[in-house]
Amino acid sequence: MAINLAIDSVQSREGGPFAAVVIKNGQVIGQGHNTVTATHDPTAHAEINAIRNACQQLSSFQLENCDIYTTCEPCPMCLGAIYWARPEAVYYASAKTDAATAGFDDQFIYDEIALPIHSRQILTQQEMRDEAQTIFDLWVTKKDKTKY
């Protein structure tokens, strides 16, 4: 199903060559394809769209007892979202090297993550840490929070 969604995405010019579905108890509860260019949203990857769709269907921010089927090994952003969503498993078809051959190479992101912050290509600088600590202090003492 994910492969067919990706084929439709490419043929319709609606998005890139990626798609994903979320399954729970043998039922599709979420699906998505890449809509980065169609929506002008760099986060609109297939896995992110499928996770959003499934979470809305479940009225939950977690994908407990769910599996994600995706057409390609997830990029670093999608992998992070997958871990936050906490599905049981991820099954993928193409490897990240296959995506790189087609022009979707995420290796530079893996390389950047491994570097010290001051050595990265995009300036990343910490500021106002003491002032921001108030936010976490409020969270720690909040009685009615939803932990995640």
Image (tube, rainbow, N blue to C red):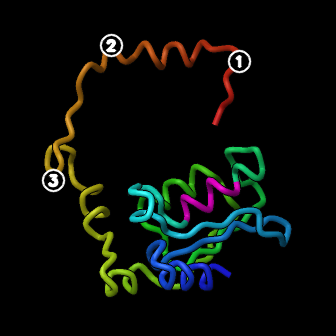
Q: Quadrant of the N terminus?
A: bottom right
User: Residue flagged by tag 3: what amino acid is it?
Assistant: Gln
Q: Quadrant of the C terminus?
A: top right
Q: Residues within 10 Å of mark 2 (few under 14, many from 20)?
A: few
Q: Viewer-proximal residue, 2 or 131?
A: 2
Q: Give the CA separation, mark 3 to mark 1.
A: 40 Å
Residue 63 percent location from the top left of the image: 71, 54
Q: Give the CA separation, mark 3 to mark 2.
A: 27 Å
Q: Residues within 10 Å of mark 1 (few under 14, many from 20)?
A: few
Q: Is residue 56 above or below residue 2?
A: above
Q: Which mark is residue 55?
A: none
Q: Is residue 88 left or right of residue 27?
A: left
Q: Which residues are magenta?
A: 47-54
> In the image, is residue 146 part of the stretch drawn in magenta?
no
Q: Residues within 10 Å of mark 3 (few under 14, many from 20)?
A: few
Q: Which mark is residue 121?
A: 3
Name the residue carrying label 1: 144
Q: Residue at x 63, y 14 (%)?
A: 142
Q: Earlier in the sequence, mark 3 or mark 2?
A: 3
Q: Is residue 122 above or below residue 137?
A: below
How many numbered marks have been drawn onto this rendered protein structure?
3
Q: Earlier in the sequence, mark 2 or mark 1?
A: 2
Q: Residue at x 48, y 65 (%)?
A: 35
Residue 126 is at least partly visible in this image: yes
Q: Residue at x 65, y 54 (%)?
A: 86
Q: Quadrant of residue 48?
A: bottom right
User: Residue flagged by tag 1: what amino acid is it?
Assistant: Asp
Q: Earlier in the sequence, mark 3 or mark 1?
A: 3
Q: Residue at x 23, y 30 (%)?
A: 126
Q: Is residue 124 left or right of residue 18?
A: left
Residue 102 percent location from the top left of the image: 34, 85
User: Residue flagged by tag 2: what amino acid is it?
Assistant: Glu
